[in-house]
Image: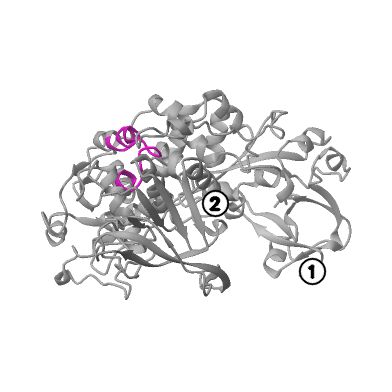
Amino acid sequence: MSKGRFRLVRTGAEWFAKNIKCQDRCPAHTDVPRYVSLIAQGRFADAYEVNRTANVIPAILGRVCVRLCEGACRRRDLDETVSICHLKRSAADFGRLGTRPGTPIERKRQRVGIVGAGPTGLTAASDLAQLGYRVAIFEALPVVGGMLRVGIPPYRLPRDVIQNTIIQDLESLGVDIHLNRPVGKDIGLDHLIRIFDAVLIAAGAHKPEKLGIPGEHLDGVLHGVTFMRRANLGEPTGLGERVAVIGLGHTAIDCARSAVRLGAKSVHVIYRRTAAEAAVGAEEIEEAEEEGVTFHYLVSPTAINSDDQSRIVGLACVRNALGEPDASGRRRPVPVPGSEFILPVDTVIPAVSQSPDITFLPPEIGLEMSRWDRLEVDKRTFMTNKPGVFAAGDFITGPRDVIGVIADAHAVSASIDAYLNGGQRLQRRAKFTVLQRYQRDGDYLTTQRAPMPTLPTAERASLQEEVELGLALAAARTEATRCLQCQINVMIDSTRCVLCGLCIDACPQGVLRMVAIEALSTDDQTAVSLGGHLPTSGAAMVIDEKLCIRCGLCENRCPTKAISMVQFEWEAPPPAEPVESAPQMISQAASRGSIQPARQKR
């Protein structure tokens, strides 16, 4: 073991996978660099297939995803993140018609029943049908999609997109979808357990959470999920002219913008924290402001007032100041004495949260519940305490983002397959490819992020008119070239490297460095992989991975061909249990980034 400025650590497939920050941050581990690269080449159908393998509904996610990948994108260290989500939509816009729906392998005799046709249930149905199982979905609503259909307005997610990307694909796979069949009323859960070999409960979280303030019983109080369901199904909403929406999550912003489109003369959003702490991004807030929504930050409702114990006349509020951090790590809103005021409104839409409705679970089945009235499941398999009964998605956690529950669905599908066939989960294998004649477009560092074209504000009068219009084909290809392609790594063959330093001179980012051996350190495990010790003198080449822009100039400049550009990828979609099969390499971690030295020959 030795000590120095640069610490050597062992690396392998998992290290390289985590170094692709966007893919690692995506709950479904979508191969972002691959599909973005395909778009840059104009291969939209192939990009769509890469997306569909991981997240099933790219046309939908390209419109409503929370973009965790973009938050991790390393391009932001240079200027702005790559428009990963918009490119996902582009893959669907220009590539979906060039693909075929998935096809099942040989049909199995086992049957799987699924409760709920939301994103969790639909994804699991697709996975299981492609594995050959006979799948039936039971949905209480008259439409497919769950919250995708009744929780998100069509100006964000057009209904034909849901029809074309979900229903058609599932029908081609032979999935039976039974609408208007609420489990617990038309058909009992105990009956499903008897007639199916496995049952997945994926009923979502549709029960609104109450504010717990006086006046919540009054006419004119429309909880967010109830209001959006009525609006999305074309039912009367009971909306007045002066509306207050409480909360600033995705449901709240959808309620506010939908209220504008449904004719409200004034719409106010009340949020107890600051805009920086809201669940929605600044872009959505700006669009709502353009449409006429007024935001009140650091304000909490205290009561809903009426003049006759029936009709709402105002919302009593108090202003807040930020105090000490709470359990979430955010500073707690503290009421400011003497700051009370009344906001004159006739409709109040609380949109703070929702929870699963567990009333259809018969007690006699004996399903184990948590103290929070959530169904208990094994965290690894998603199976309940009753063999063959599984649960996943919002139903076991409360409301989450779409991509998160899709990841749940993939995992629970693998568990159901293992349960029914006694098999093991698929294990992924790493693949390393040396890229020949590697080069990048010379403009990729200076190309600016492509803006999303939007419908003019004056034309946003209808719930049905989509606001974001999608990138043009040429704009999508140009935007895709901005990706740094973090799946490509610089590898230095230490048996060829002569430490000439020409690669250092060629690097525009100062990524490569030559350091003395004494500056390196190892732990005991890494020392073993190096043969027990480091040389006591000499020099080593190290790479600051955080700064690398994958330009390939170092490879082109190397006189001994010691440097290669090597692409890492998983040979199969990432399953729940990874297996490392990559060659062992050495990396160093410095305080300012990840450092990787020359590849070691065994």
Secondary element type, mark 1? loop
Residue sitting at x 81%, y 40%: 507
From which residue to which does the magenta span run? Answer: 148-167
Secondary element type, mark 2? helix
Q: Which residue is mark 1?
A: 2
- The location of residue 75, given as percent across then percent down, is 66, 43
Amino acid carrying label 2: it is Asp
Q: CA distance from mark 2 to mark 1?
A: 31 Å
Position of residue 289 relative to residue 1, above or below, is above
- The location of residue 250, given as percent across then percent down, is 43, 51
Amino acid carrying label 1: it is Ser
Give residue 24's mark.
2
Rate crowding at label 1 as few (under 14), some (14 to 19) or many (20 or more) other CA atoms within 10 Å.
Answer: some
Residue sitting at x 52%, y 35%: 87
Residue 144: quarter of image = top left
Count of numbered badges drawn on the protein: 2
Residue 349 or 109: which is nearer the viewer? 349
Residue sitting at x 76%, y 36%: 555
